[in-house]
Amino acid sequence: MAMPLRQSIKVATYLAEQKIRRRDKFPLIVELEPLFACNLKCEGCGKIQHPAGVLKQRMPVAQAVGAVMESGAPMVSIAGGEPLMHPQIDEIVRQLVAKRKYVFLCTNAMLLRKKMDKFTPSPYFAFAVHIDGLRERHDESVAKEGVFDEAVEAIKEAKRRGFRVTTNSTFFNTDTPQTIIEVLNFLNDDLQVDEMMISPAYAYEKAPDQEHFLGVEQTRELFKKAFAGGNRRRWRLNHSPLFLDFLEGKVDFPCTAWAIPNYSLFGWQRPCYLMSDGYVPTYRELVEDTDWDKYGRGKDPRCANCMAHCGYEPTAVLATMGSLKESLRALRETVSGNRE
């Protein structure tokens, strides 16, 4: 795990505070969606399926920042849609960074070089560029040629200007261990991004392509083979060791979707950003008025093949904090990653 040490300490302190206050449900990172509009039509995403009137809406800055502050989460992932299409996205980021929130701005990078001057490098801020494979594979997944090359050039420029750059890669049942190894080697060694996040493709119900999502056993076999030969230790993966164990099938966890809640133009989404069972105006209502026991694998058929980070990464983090052995293991990997 290559999370910066300062960030690791802040998150660990935050988790300790929740334990002292005896809170059993709290947010770790908020997934903020200030718009649904996008400049691409990715096959695995259903955000742009919203009506035209909804796609034209942009969340006010005060609303976006207020939701994050109300939740109390130490980290924010700003997604969409394409957040760089929001005319005030730089102000949202600026205000959140000023409040010492760790902000990850998720982007397909098509507008990144054009909009980069609006942002300032900070240890509290990172661009999170979506890369699903090398050139041919990535361009196929986003249904447009040239996107991979533009993303690569944008990453290089952002790194040159001193920004932290992370990546997010989603893998489908059309991937093989080798395609995973190839793209992560490229991101880790050639582009030298700061951190990489990986995710098995999840059955997002509004996605145009419903044929290529991974099942649980497929996911475990795929990552077990991709992680072999020391790759897992060498790559700067932005995940807890226990979550990577989970992807390989070495451990299993219940879902804790309340820890990575989604806030969009509609409010706080119940129960997670992959499933829409209604919205509430406050995080407190989301936590207190949702029957969390009815969600997760073995409980809701929609959750049957889900191994997404929004449900299981926080469970792994909490399990790490509850074990001295796992805490020391995570610390070793954090320190090792920061030395590279």
Image (spheres, rainbow, N blue to C red):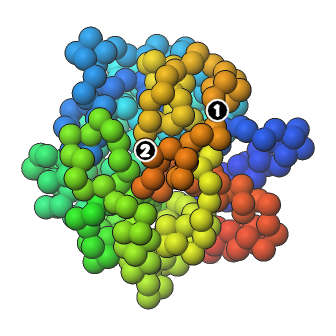
Residue marked by disc 2: 302
As drawn, the residue found furthest toward the right would be 20
What residue is at 40 percent from the left and 75 percent from the top? 221
- Residue 219 location in percent, x, y? 40, 67
Q: Quadrant of residue 102?
A: top right
Q: Of marks 1 and 2, which one's residue comes earlier in the chain? A: 1
Is residue 25 in view? yes
Q: Amino acid at mark 1?
A: Asp
Q: Amino acid at mark 2?
A: Arg
Q: In this view of the protein, which residue sits in the foreground, 79 or 211? A: 211
- Residue 118 location in percent, x, y? 39, 30
Where 45 sits versus 179, above or below? above
The residues tagged by marks 1 and 2 sit, at their Cα atoms, a distance apart of: 15 Å
Where 298 sits versus 265, above or below? below
Where 272 sits versus 241, above or below? above
Residue marked by disc 1: 291
Q: Quadrant of residue 260?
A: top right
What residue is at 62 percent from the left and 60 percent from the top? 253
Q: Secondary structure at mark 2?
A: helix
- Residue 238 location in percent, x, y? 52, 60
